[in-house]
Amino acid sequence: MNLCMLTIQQAQALLREKKITAVELIRAVMDRIRSIENKVGAFITLVETSAMEQAREADRRIDSGDSSVLLGIPVAVKDILCTRGIRTTCGSGILKNFIPPYDATAIQRLREAGAVIIGKTNMDEFAMGSSTEYSAFKVTRNPWDLSRIPGGSSGGSAAAVAADMCLGALGSDTGGSVRQPASHCGVVGMKPTYGRVSRFGLVAFASSLDQVGVLAKSVYDSALLMRVISGHDPRDSTSAPVPVPDYTRDFKEGLKGVTIGVPVEYRSLEGMDADVSEAFSKSIQTMESLGARCVEVSLPHTPYAVAAYYVIAPSEASSNLARYDGVKYGFRDPEATDLSSMYCKTRSKGFGPEVQRRILIGTYCLSAGYYDAYYKKASQIRTLIIQDFKKAFETCQVLLSPVAPTPAFPIGEKVEDPLTMYLSDVFTLSANLSGIPGISIPCGFSKEGLPIGLQLMGNHFDETMLYRAAYHFEKATDFHLKKPQL
C-alpha cells in the first residue's frame, strides 16, 4: 500500500485502527516529495524535521485515545498564510527571509485538529496570477503534463495534492485562485463564503475579496478540512459569527428536488475550449440523471465582471502593499542613500513585474482625478453582480458553470500577455465579487488528457448544499480517481 496516495478519510481510518502510524505516513509523503519535487516544483519551504516531530506527537496522542479529526494527516500550506517559526514569503523576493512570530487562525485550527504541516507551497507573487509563473522562486509544473501550468495562484498547493505530495492543502482565493488550479490539476477546490474562514494571518492582497480555501483529493476530504478551519474569529473584523455545520450532514440525501441553475451568459462566452464545453454539457446531463432539475438563469452583468474585478483588486492591492517599504520588515535595498531612494529601490527590486503592474493600475484607479470614473464605478457594478446572484438563487439552490475557459495551457504561453491571462478567471471571479461560495470538482479530461473542472456556486453560507451536490456528482463519476503518471 502506497500511503501517500491515501485520501484523508482513508488515512484517518487506518490511523485510528492503528494499522499504520503517523510517522509511517509522513515518511511516505516525504519520500514522495524527494522523488518528484524536482519535476513539479510545488514547494518553497519544507519542514521535514518539524513534520516528523509532529508525527511522533500524533502517534502518542492516538495511543492515548485522542480522536482529533486531522490527527497525523500531512497537510501543505500556501505560502501566503503566516506560520510561526516557518518562513512565509508570499512567493515574493521582498519577503524571502520573513519568519512570522505567530500562526494564522486557519493554521492554528489545523494544528489544534492534529494536522501535520509539512511545508509551504509555491504561488504567484502575493497571489497575483493565474498560472504560478509569477513566483520569485520557481515555476510550478502541472503533474498531468510538466510542460503546462498548474493554474494559480494556489498552483503549488493544487499540484502537491494532485501529485500525492500531501493529503490536503490550504490555499487562498481572491478571484479563483483555489478553484482554477484545482480544475487544472484534477482535484477538489473550495472557496467558502466571504467571512466563513478567518483572514487573520492571511497576508492581504485584496481584503474585500480574499478568502482562505482548501484543496483535497475528494469532496469528503474537502468538507473535513473546511469544517476544521471555519468559524468566527474575533481577531478578524470581517469574520462572520455564523454557526459552522457538519458539511457532510446531507450526503445521504440525493439530489431529487434540487434545482440547479445554468447561467446563459456562461454558455455563450467567447474563447471557450470545445473540450471544456463538451465536459460541461455532459456534467449537466449527469446532474439531471441524479434527479436534479437544471434550469436556465441569467446573470446579466457578467460581461462587466472582469473589468470591475481588475479595478477593485489592484486598487486594494495598491493600498495593502504600501506596507512593504523597506522600513518595517522584509527586504531593504542596501544601496539606498536617502528615504525616497530607499522606498523606490526597495519596491522596484523587491516586487516582481506582475505585482508592480497591479500596484500601478490600482494607484491610478484610486487617484484623485479618476476615483469616481474607475473604483466607484467598479463598486457599483459589483453591487449589480451581487443582485444578479440574489435573484438567481430565488429560483435555484446551486449554480453550475465551467471553472476555466480552457484546460491548462503551456508554460510561457500567456506570461507576456496579461490581458489574456486575466480572462482565465472569467468564470470564477464573480463569486469573489459577490462573496458567495464556490467549489471546483473534476468533471472530465481534454483530448490531450488534461483535467477539466466543474464549478458549483451556492448562496451565502450554504456550503452544505454545494458539498451535497458535489458529493453525489463525484460518486456518479470516476474522474477524481485518475492519477497523473509521474
Image (cartoon, helix red, strand yellow):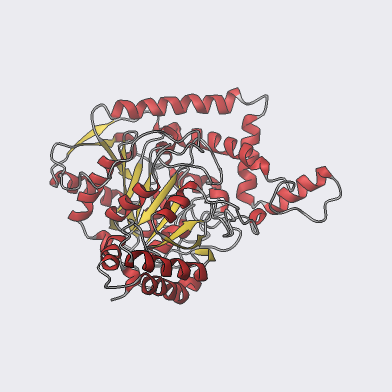
Q: Quadrant of the N terminus?
A: bottom left
Residue 236, position as x, y percentages in the image? 50, 37
Residue 220, position as x, y percentages in the image? 27, 54
Residue pictured at 76% horizontal, 46% vertical:
344
Residue pictured at 48% horizontal, 64% vertical:
42
Count of labels in the image: 0
Please state if 169 lies on the left or on the right of 49 as rendered.
left
Residue pictured at 45% horizontal, 49% vertical:
106
Asked whether residue 150 is in view, the answer is: no
Asked whether residue 124 is in view, the answer is: yes
Pick whichever, 271 or 205, lies toward us. Answer: 205
Q: Report which quarter residue 270 is drawn in.
A: top left
The residue lying furthest to the front in this view is: 64
Pick whichever, 319 or 383, lies toward us. Answer: 319
Residue 49, position as x, y percentages in the image? 51, 71
The residue lying furthest to the right in this view is: 337
Pick whichever, 455 or 370, lies toward us. Answer: 455
Residue 301, position as x, y percentages in the image? 40, 29
Q: Quadrant of the C terminus?
A: bottom left
Please state if 87 lies on the left or on the right of 171 as rendered.
right
Q: Is residue 408 above or below residue 365?
A: below
